[in-house]
Amino acid sequence: MRDIALYHGDDHGWIEVITGVMFSGKSEELIRRVRRALIARKRVQLFKSALDDRYAGARRISSHDGAAVEAIPIRSGLELAELAHPTTQVFGIDEVQFLDESVVEILTLLADRGARIIAAGTDMDFRGEPFGPMPQLLTRAETVDKLHAICVVCGSPATRNQRLVNGQPAPFEAPTIQVGGADSYEARCRRCHEVPSATRDQTTLLDTLMAEPAHARVLTAEAVRKG
Ligand SMILES: [Zn+2]
């Protein structure tokens, strides 16, 4: 992973987004950057979505020289704003996709004030659609690193989150965030990603256009003119 080359001094803020599929090492990369900030003796605050219960209690990140920071669970961008300390120089946020849209404005304001923001989160939901505040955040970020996992089906670079319910692909209509469900996730590539739908019309505009030869459309137009 290349290092951020934006650093100009303490009063220049920016937003870094670490994104990509689940199991691609986003949290590890966030921890690596936060650890380096601690080594540089920056004042760091680390947050994580309270929805993420994979880790019991607060997550503690420490550097070899003894500096440490604990991840504070939050439910919204406004909660982050309330807990943000005015002297904090580096804000790390994990699982940022679970937070509401207000997090975009809050992180933008903090960066405008000179803070370095390191936000990690998956950019797509299980359907392959943009996840929560991620599109807005990606647009406003100075740097974006999109990480890949390995497709568990074919071994290609994985870019999609495959949700499984009882071992079967979850339908398109399922809720985006399933709290306490019996579902599981796999990393998959575009080709192996499966999102069945009972109600959605599977015929896309592209299918329709490709099924109808171009000359047929021209003939139809001429027929209309002659008619
Ligand atoms: Zn695949």
Image (cartoon, grey):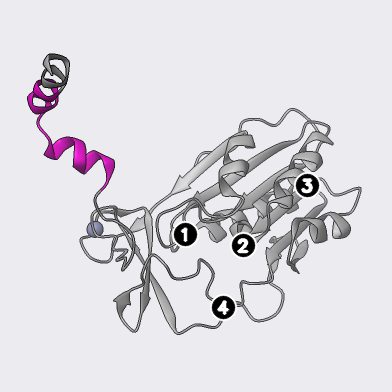
- Could you say which disc has been placed on residue 98 in the image? 2
Q: Viewed as shown, does residue 174 lie left or right of 48?
A: left
Q: Give the crowd class for mark 3: few <14, some 14-19, many >=20 residues within 10 Å.
A: some
Question: Of label 2 and label 4, which has the lower sequence position?
Answer: 2
Q: Give the crowd class for mark 1: few <14, some 14-19, many >=20 residues within 10 Å.
A: some
Quadrant hosting residue 150: bottom left
Residue 217 on the magenta segment = yes
Tell me the CA gap for discs 1 and 3: 23 Å
Tell me the CA gap for discs 3 and 2: 15 Å
- Could you say which disc has been placed on residue 179 in the image? 4
Residue drawn at point x = 76 percent, y = 35 percent: 13
Tell me which amino acid carries mark 4.
Val
Q: Viewed as shown, does residue 153 lie left or right of 3?
A: left
Location of mark 3 (residue): 106
In the rendered image, residue 188, in percent from the top left (x then y), is placed at 31, 60
Quadrant hosting residue 28: bottom right
Q: Which residues are magenta?
A: 204-220
Question: Of label 2 and label 1, which has the lower sequence position?
Answer: 2
